[in-house]
Image (spheres, helix red, strand yellow):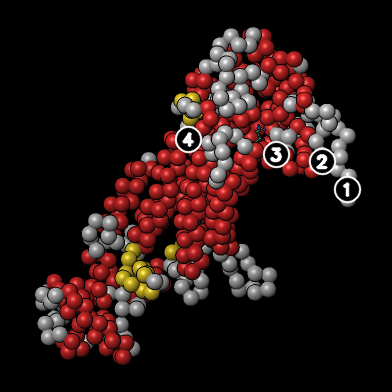
Amino acid sequence: MTDTTSSKSSNQMWGGRFAAGPDAIMEAINASIGFDKRMATQDIEGSRAHAAMLGATGILQASDVDAIREGLLTVLSEIEAGEFAFSTALEDIHMNVEARLKEIIGEPAGRLHTGRSRNDQVATDFKLWVREQLDATDTGLCALIRALLAQAEAGAEWVMPGFTHLQTAQPVTWGHHMMAYVEMFGRDLSRVRDARARMNECPLGAAALAGTSFPIDRHMTAEALGFDAPSANSLDAVSDRDFALEFLSVASICAVHLSRFAEELVIWSSAQFRFVALSDRFSTGSSIMPQKKNPDAAELIRAKVGRIFGANTALMMVMKGLPLAYSKDMQEDKEQVFDAADNLMLALAAMTGMVTDMTANRDSLAAAAGAGFSTATDLADWLVRVPGLPFRDAHHVTGSLVALAERKGCDLPELSLEDMQSAHPGITAEVFDVLGVENSVASRLSYGGTAPARVREQVARWKELMS
Ligand code: ARG
């Protein structure tokens, strides 16, 4: 057995009642500095707002506040320059910053923690961090939507097969397919904005859990940190991680959308489909098969939802059943969110790059659009519209013509008029007009339909929204 008894003295921040320092294993399980150092900027920003408020309310003397402000800027510059020595014994970013501040400015550093606790401090830091990620997601989604709009605009009238069950269903346009993803990522964008608006309340000043007896001004710190208001219940303020859960939920749904699109790109770029060519910049080769150009970025984007939704599940489980208010369990929130955020940003950027660079293969799309009896519904609709058949009968007649074409090994437009009339005598030569894919898509003018005119309207609407 390893002897893990520590000969260290008790913790300089909270060790007043302790005779001995922590066991090494205790230190290892307790410390979060290894990851929460990513919140250094937010921690210092929160402390600067808190100190300024303590000065403005007369709780601290101006000279102490000045020393704290200057000292915190020095700490920040040390961290930014990579010169800061993070200490595991000091547990987390909050105590690392405060201890260094003490080394730099001495006694006034000990006054910074007046009227606050690490519980409201960490909630504030983490909210600031998550808020930045929501803003970065907003930016990333806008870039992706713009890339999709450019594709949709260029190919508003290019025909391609539309699928249900991954079986050819009806012809659609390339622009329409791109715009389907614009709608999906547009909903993600609206979820990001909803979440940001809802989370923007400041926990700082809730102190450990009950508020404080010092005459602090929570409105002042909330405003200084860009929050809309201070949170209204101190117990809730220190124990709330909804903002992180909501970020992870929004990120998970977005990652699901990214994975669906990535899957289509993997299929479309295969030799069997050839619907798109991905650029060299977003593809890789094989070390053994010289002919290969693999859609690795798309595959990795397809996979990212695993860890992002995993983080969502993990934090849901961490928070489940926690009694009010703060519990150390909640320290397990950060790594999940950090990892999910990093990977979501990467996936959004990679997808935007791929969409910007990809070239649709118009000929393959058009050839596939007409295959597989894709205009059978147009034929049935024509039978309703012209000879006036009930739709069910029209469906049946069309089905028999599809079977005939299948027996003859041809597509619907290649059947003769006599073949057509053998299924229903009311069919005239005009029917051939609706069997072409271009006419098929042009006829789907219902609102939200695939007709190029409709697609252009939607592109214009989205361009306006994104401007
Ligand atoms: N490192 C801690 C966390 O991330 C900070 C809060 C600690 N609070 C406490 N009462 N021990 O949650």
Measured Cα–Cα span from mark 2 to mark 1: 10 Å
Secondary structure state at the residue bearing disc 2: helix
Measured Cα–Cα span from mark 2 to mark 3: 14 Å
Q: Mark 1–mark 3 contact, CB under 8 Å?
A: no
Q: Is mark 3 within 8 Å of ligand 1?
A: yes
Amino acid found under the numbered disc labelled 1: Thr
Image depth: mark 1 or mark 3 in front: 1
Image depth: mark 2 or mark 4 in front: 2
Secondary structure state at the residue bearing disc 3: loop
Return the x and y of residue 304 as percentages of the image width and height.
Answer: 56, 56
Return the x and y of residue 398 as percentages of the image width and height.
Answer: 22, 81
Amino acid found under the numbered disc labelled 4: Met
Residue 211 location, quadrant: top right
Secondary structure state at the residue bearing disc 1: loop
User: Residue beneath label 3, please?
Assistant: 32
Measured Cα–Cα span from mark 1 to mark 4: 46 Å
Secondary structure state at the residue bearing disc 4: helix
Q: In the rendering, which numbered label is found on residue 24?
A: 2
Q: Going 47% across and 35% down the picture, which residue do you hit?
A: 199
Q: Is residue 292 left or right of residue 395?
A: right
Q: Going 30% across and 90% down the picture, which residue do you hit?
A: 408
Q: Mark 1–mark 4 contact, CB under 8 Å?
A: no
Amino acid found under the numbered disc labelled 3: Ser
Crowding around mark 2 (Cα neighbors within 10 Å: few <14, some 14 to 19, many 20+) is: some
Whichever of labels 1 and 4 marks the residue nearer the N terminus, that label is 1
Q: In the rendering, which numbered label is found on residue 199?
A: 4
Residue 59 location, quadrant: top right
